[in-house]
Image: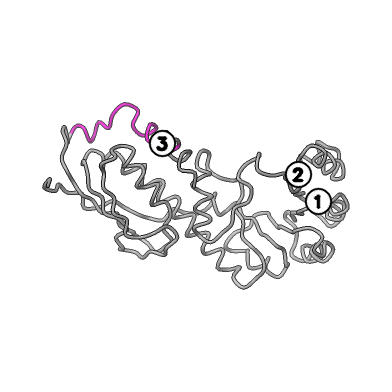
């Protein structure tokens, strides 16, 4: 993960939650007092985002001590202690929600991704995420997908060429869109084309697409498309792919399957900071 950009986003999240002061904390804790609190998992899952969680408290006060008892990507159990924090009670209270928001969201994505990836185990098909991420959370959410055993598709619009239906419509057809992309982009960029039927698949193949995305096609048509392409381009399928229906795609034989659900539909993993108490300063 890009720590520089992550820090910028974490600071913005803290500014969102503390515009001037934490009046609840300042009302009950008017001066420094050392305290400790435990991070506890409340359901089984895959933990992800521990360094982000820690960074929230370190940004508020670099003297905060965070003892991590697990690592990103590890499976955790209900009731498991994940971390112990020690520091200024005011910091522990003020950073709690922002830190948990990151950790719960990222762990939820990692958990959901691990469940979907497990369904593809033993097949040639690799699981990909999409750009259907929460604004200003992409760096965290795509990292969570990797922690859960998935793979990242392009990071953003500057990262790769993907000609979707509206690009094709704007260019006047697949042949024209691919030709324009080849003329505009460096030779190092692969060109991916989204198709919706076998005729479009043939056109994309003839135009020289490097990757052909089979969008919302039936499994039978996907099988026909893979046979038609016959290794002359990489194949990806997409379109409402979820944990519930991904098993149906395995037999299609595509190289990749992309699922927006990994990031836009994963429930959080329930985690909590518990048992905050003062400790004697050494």
Dominant SS type (magenta): helix
Question: Which secondary structure lies at badge 2?
Answer: strand
> Residue 150: percent from the left, percent from the top?
56, 59
C-alpha distance separating marks 1 and 2: 10 Å
Q: Residue furthest top?
A: 20
**Badge 3 vs badge 1, beta-carbon distance below 8 Å:** no
Give the quarter of the image for residue 119: bottom right
Q: Earlier in the sequence, mark 1 or mark 2?
A: 2
Q: Is 143 in the magenta?
A: no
Dot 1 crowding, Cα within 10 Å, few <14, some 14–19, many 20+: many
Residue shown at the point (73%, 67%) measured from the top left:
252
In the image: residue 279, left or right of residue 190: left
The residue carrying mark 1 is 209
> Residue 38: percent from the left, percent from the top?
25, 54
Q: Which mark is residue 13?
A: 3
Is residue 214 or residue 207 the one in the foreground? 207
Q: Is 18 in the magenta?
A: yes
Residue shown at the point (72%, 63%) measured from the top left:
254
Q: Which mark is residue 192?
A: none
**Magenta span of residues:** 9-27
In the image: residue 265, left or right of residue 193: left
The residue carrying mark 2 is 163
> Residue 177: percent from the left, percent from the top?
82, 41
Question: Which secondary structure lies at badge 1?
Answer: loop
C-alpha distance separating marks 3 and 1: 41 Å
In the image: residue 17, left or right of residue 222: left
């Amino acid at each position: 993960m890009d720590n520089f950009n992550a820090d910028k986003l974490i600071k913005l999240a803290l500014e969102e939650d503390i515009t001037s002061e934490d009046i609840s904390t300042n009302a009950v804790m008017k001066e420094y007092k050392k305290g400790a609190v435990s991070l506890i998992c409340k359901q089984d899952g895959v933990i992800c985002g521990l360094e982000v969680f820690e960074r929230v408290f370190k940004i508020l006060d670099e003297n905060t001590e965070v003892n991590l008892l697990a690592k990103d990507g590890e499976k955790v159990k209900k009731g498991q202690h994940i971390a112990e924090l020690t520091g200024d009670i005011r910091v522990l209270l003020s950073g709690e929600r922002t830190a948990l928001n990151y950790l719960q969201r990222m762990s939820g994505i990692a958990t959901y991704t691990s469940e979907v990836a497990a369904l593809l185990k033993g097949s040639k098909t690799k699981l990909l995420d999409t750009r259907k991420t929460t604004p200003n959370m992409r760096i965290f959410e795509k990292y969570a997908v990797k922690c859960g055993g998935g793979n990242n598709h392009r990071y953003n619009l500057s990262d790769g060429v993907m000609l979707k239906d509206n690009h094709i419509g704007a260019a006047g057809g697949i042949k024209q869109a691919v030709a324009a992309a080849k003329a505009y982009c460096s030779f190092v960029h692969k060109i991916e084309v989204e198709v919706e039927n076998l005729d479009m698949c043939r056109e994309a193949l003839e135009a020289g697409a490097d990757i052909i995305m089979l969008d919302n096609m039936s499994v039978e048509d996907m099988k026909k498309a893979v046979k038609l392409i016959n290794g002359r381009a990489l194949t990806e399928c997409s379109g409402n792919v979820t944990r519930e229906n991904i098993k149906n795609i395995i037999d299609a034989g595509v190289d990749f399957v992309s699922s927006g659900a990994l990031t836009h539909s994963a429930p959080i993993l329930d985690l909590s900071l518990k048992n905050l108490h003062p400790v004697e300063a050494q």
